[in-house]
Each structure stands twice: as C-alpha cells, then as structure tokens.
C-alpha cells in the first residue's frame, strides 16, 4: 500500500475473510486516523513526535520556542519509561531543555524553517541524548567560561556549563550537510536515589 | 509546583511562575513559585522589579522556597535583576533556596554574587 502524502487512500475490500486483508483494513483505519489528526493539528505534523519503542523517543520541531512544550512532554514520557527518580528526571529535563533551546536559538537562529531534533534512548545503564540542529551556532571549546569573574554578571552563557556539569559525556560534532549534533550521556545505574 | 514526574503527572504541562509581593517596612519580599524559565517566567520577574523600582522601592528579597526549576535564562534574569537594582543604588538578596536552585547557583558560582539566607528575619535584619 502506498502511504506517501498526497496518495489517495482507498479502503481495501472487507468482504474476503482473509487474515492479510483484515490486517490491511486495520492499517488503513490507523493511517486515516493519523492523517485526520495531522490535518486538524498542523503543529503536531511539523513537530512529529514518534514513540520508537520501549527505550527510545524522538521529536523533531521547527525552531520556535513555543514548541518547547512538546519537548517537556516527551521528556516526561521518557523519564517515566526509564523509571528515573525525581532528582535524575529534573536534571535530565533541564539539560535537554538547555540543549534544545541552544539548538533553536544559536544553531538555527530561531528560523522556523529549520528543525531541531531530539533523540532519547537508554540501555538501562545510561541515557543517551542527541540533539541535532541545522546551523551549528557554537563550538564547545569556544564557549566563554561563565564562572570567570569577568562574565559572572552576564545574563547569558550558562547553558553549556549546566549541561557539562550534569552529564557524564558531552560531545559536539558537525553533521554532514550542515548543522551540529550534540551527544550527551548520563549514567543512571547506581545514580543516587 | 513544576511539572511532575513518575506517577504524579508525567508529561503534563509545565506551570509557569507565580509571583506575589508583600512588604515589610521598606523591603519588598517577592514570593516566587513555579518555574523561572525562558519566556513568561523571566518576563514576570523583570517587569515587576522594574515597576517597583519605578515606584521608588530599592530593597528586594526574593523568596525562592517554592521554585525548584530554574533554567539558565532564569539564572540570567536573577543576575539581571541584581545588577538593575544595584545600579539604582538598591539591594537584592535571595531567601530559601531549594537544593536544586542552590546546586545551580553553586555550579555557576553565582553564590559568590548573591547574598543568600535561609531565614527571613535574619535577611531583613541585614537590609535595615
């Protein structure tokens, strides 16, 4: 069945009592439902939220700060799935929020035509978070130290410090074709409860 | 309360900041609750302090007892408030930090900037 956008989807015959046909009918109903929701809520389509399995979550949003609510909702689902305690959940949410805001504001220059993508996965011992943008607004080793006396009273520049302080691994790489990929890992096994 | 985790309200909408002002003599105590984050949360604080400064107030005590989520923009707003008040010849101090906020102020070395108190009466004594 061709399910690509714009394809005119017609229901398969329900008359034949063949299992594969029934399955196709169920798929059809699901596709129609998803299509209907997409048309009713374009923001939902742009910020496509995908549940990829029991240990992996993904979200792509246009570069608008208003879309951050979807990020917080996805993180809420992930920390529940991973059964994180409140403390870990808090810091995971904060670091993800900081990195997505960085991607939107500094990477994509708040251009809604550009997207920021968040992936959260866990192997049970650690959580891996990947944030990708289409702009690459900074380099980790070039970020000014906000704890330097000269910078202490500046109103911005603390996001990366917060991320680095909480995460066990942080690395930033340039993506092929443009943009940056921030990868962060937090060990959760043996973390204080 | 911030967005909850686990069994409380997973993935629920995050509540933004609520600010209530009260006055003891010439000190304005701002009781903050919720989340101080980029956008509405920081704007509420900024506008309130600017309004109070405009009305002649110069002594501010920010009670953060019910704030347990603050992001880098929220921290930036605290710093901006501090410098704005100081530039007007006033003082701004912090009261009742939660552990999470205290940890963030420690990480960012902002504990070296702000005077922090765990007791309102003691804080007020220093602002006479």
Image: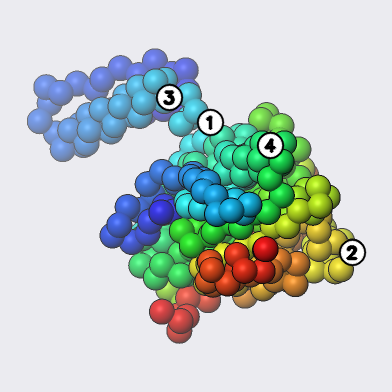
Q: Nearer the viewer, residue A175 or B98?
A: B98
Residue B32 in the image: above or below residue B114: above
- Count neighbours of disc 3 (C-alpha within 10 A) and say few if under 14, some if 14 to 19, many if 20 or more: few
Q: Give percent across and percent down for residue B12.
A: 37, 46
- Calculate the distance from the C-alpha at mark 4 to the C-alpha at mark 3: 45 Å
Q: Give percent across and percent down for residue A67.
A: 55, 37
- Count neighbours of disc 1 (C-alpha within 10 A) and say few if under 14, some if 14 to 19, many if 20 or more: some
> Could you say which disc has been placed on residue A150 in the image?
2
Q: Give percent across and percent down for residue B25.
A: 59, 53
Kindly state the secondary structure of the residue where label 3 is placed: loop
Kindly state the secondary structure of the residue where label 2 is placed: loop
- Tell me the quarter of the picture where residue A63 sits: top right
Of the image marks 3 and 1, the number of the one nearer the N terminus: 3
**Residue positioned most to the bottom:** A190
Give the label, 2 or 4, closer to the camera.
4
Q: Give the side of residue B54 with respect to residue A168, left or right.
A: right
- Calculate the distance from the C-alpha at mark 1 to the C-alpha at mark 4: 45 Å
Quadrant position of the N terminus of chain A in the picture:
top left
- Calculate the distance from the C-alpha at mark 3 to the C-alpha at mark 1: 9 Å
Does label 1 lie on the same chain as label 3?
A: yes
Quadrant position of the C terminus of chain A in the picture:
bottom left
* Residue A78, visible in the rendered structure: yes
Q: Which residue is mark 4?
A: B55
Given contact means CB atoms under 8 Å apart, are the residues at marks 4 and 3 in contact? no
Q: Residue at x 85, y 69 (%)?
A: A148
Give the label, 3 or 2, closer to the camera.
2
Given contact means CB atoms under 8 Å apart, are the residues at marks 3 and 2 in contact? no
Does label 1 lie on the same chain as label 2?
A: yes
Q: Nearer the viewer, residue B37 or A119?
A: B37
Kindly state the secondary structure of the residue where label 1 is placed: helix
> Mark 1 — on which chain does it sit?
A
């Amino acid at each position: 069945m061709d399910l690509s956008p714009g394809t005119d989807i017609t229901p398969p015959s329900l008359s034949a009592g063949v299992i594969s046909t029934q399955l196709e009918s169920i798929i059809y109903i699901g596709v129609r439902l998803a299509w209907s929701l997409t048309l009713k809520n374009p923001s939902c389509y742009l910020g496509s939220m995908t549940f990829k399995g029991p240990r992996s979550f993904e979200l792509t949003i246009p570069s608008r700060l208003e879309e951050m609510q979807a990020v917080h909702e996805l993180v809420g689902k992930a920390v529940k799935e991973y059964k994180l305690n409140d403390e870990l959940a808090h810091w995971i949410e904060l670091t993800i929020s900081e990195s997505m805001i960085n991607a939107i504001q500094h990477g994509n220059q708040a251009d809604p035509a550009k997207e920021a993508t968040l992936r959260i996965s866990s192997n049970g011992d650690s959580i891996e978070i990947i944030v990708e943008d289409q702009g690459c607004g900074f380099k980790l080793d070039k970020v000014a130290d906000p704890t330097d006396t000269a910078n202490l009273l500046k109103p911005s520049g603390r996001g990366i410090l917060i991320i680095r302080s909480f995460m066990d691994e942080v690395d930033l790489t340039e993506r092929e074709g443009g943009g940056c990929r921030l990868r962060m890992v937090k060990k959760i096994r043996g973390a204080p409860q | 309360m911030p967005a909850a985790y686990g069994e409380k309200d997973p993935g629920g909408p995050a509540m933004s900041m609520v600010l209530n002002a009260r006055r003891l003599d010439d000190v304005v105590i701002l009781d903050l609750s919720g989340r101080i984050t980029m956008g509405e949360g920081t704007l509420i604080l900024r506008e309130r302090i600017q309004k109070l400064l405009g009305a002649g107030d110069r002594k501010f005590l920010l009670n953060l007892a019910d704030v347990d989520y603050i992001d880098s923009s929220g921290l930036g707003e605290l710093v901006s408030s501090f410098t704005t008040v100081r530039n007007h010849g006033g003082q701004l101090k912090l009261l009742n930090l939660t552990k999470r906020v205290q940890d963030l102020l420690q990480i960012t070395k902002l504990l070296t900037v702000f005077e922090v108190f765990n007791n309102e009466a003691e804080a007020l004594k220093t602002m006479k």
